[in-house]
Amino acid sequence: MIVGDASQILKGKTHTNNWAVLVDTSRFWFNYRHVANVLSMYRSVKRLGIPDSQIILMVADDMACNPRNPRPATVFNNAHQHINVYGEDVEVDYRGYEVTVENFVRLLTGRLAPSTPRSKRLLTDDGSNILIYMTGHGGDGFLKFQDSEEITNVELADAFEQMWQKKRYNEILFIIDTCQAASMYEHFYSPNILAIASSLVGEDSLSHHVDPAIGVYIIDRFTYYALEFLERLQVCPKRVCISTVGVRQDLYQRDPNDVLVTEFFGSVRNVELTSHILELPKCGGPGKVGLNKSNSGTSVKEKTPVSVSYVYADQLPIHRVS
């Protein structure tokens, strides 16, 4: 690729890293589909390159180990059971009763106890693009957590404003799949937020299909077709979603049509663009390295024996969070 072309492609890209916060707020077996929703999104962002170290996964109930599950240690998002979205390497950061409104807001704003492990921290900065996906039961202006408490659209908007004031994000893609989902972004007032909702105010967000083997709905319509979009680049028209997908983009400073999906769903690789050829070290055989040193157009090759010895460490260094 020509350097000038690469510079044009990267023009306007200001973020340096991608994070994902994926939240299922429902528990109980009959809400199996909400766990499948969030695990499906988790699988997609991992497949597109975001590492577990930059994904915060909050799951309110453990459907994989529920005694009603006829196939223990599995969660499926399709009745054909093609893909076990629970997988073998899922890393849940907040599970069960740890999924609360307080913990969610503290996670976003960074106001956590000093003893909180790194895996439960959102270590973002002003160069971070954050995908925030939430699924559960909601209504006009609220989203329920654990069927015992709720977060309001005002509380969520204020949490995002704290994040902006503390320079904890560059841009946020907020996606929510719940009934009357569009009400959750009505009070947003912080810049650089692009919000997508599965349903408008007054509409229900419906489930997609039942798996007769387990007797419950296993995925919601919006998430089902959002995943199909990521797999096949097909959108979710109202005739299949039934609810109307809502979008709020007035706070977003760029044209969404110019934003790549991978700016939120993929990983970021740091690339340094140069206009000259770099001369990299060459291998001179076992135990030897040939170095190319250029000075005023001249090249000198040197072969230097390299002796490397390895020892076992008694104890790995421990990083203490203050």
Image (cartoon, grey):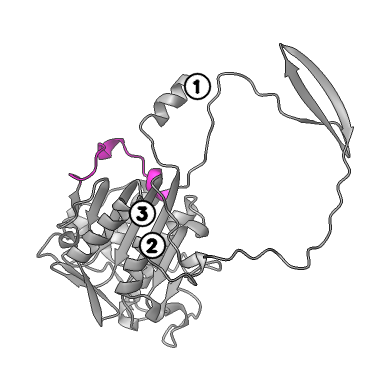
Give the left or right position of residue 24, taking residue 181 as reference. Answer: right
Relative depth, front residue between 2 and 98: 98
The stretch of residues the image draws in magenta is: 249-265
Relative depth, front residue between 28 and 193: 193
Which residue position holds label 3? 131
Total tally of numbered discs in the picture: 3
Counting from the top left corner in percent of width and height, residue 66 is at 43, 84
Comparing labels 2 and 3, the label whose residue is closer to the camera: 2
Give the left or right position of residue 193, taking residue 50 as reference. Answer: left
Mark 2 vs 1, N-terminal side:
1
The furthest residue to the bottom: 67
Please rate how many residues cluster around mark 3, counting C-alpha atoms within 10 Å: few if below 14, some from 14 to 19, many from 20: many
Q: Is residue 234 above or below residue 11?
A: below
Counting from the top left corner in percent of width and height, residue 30 is at 30, 81
Residue 110: numbered disc: 2
Comparing labels 2 and 1, the label whose residue is closer to the camera: 2
Which residue position holds label 1? 3
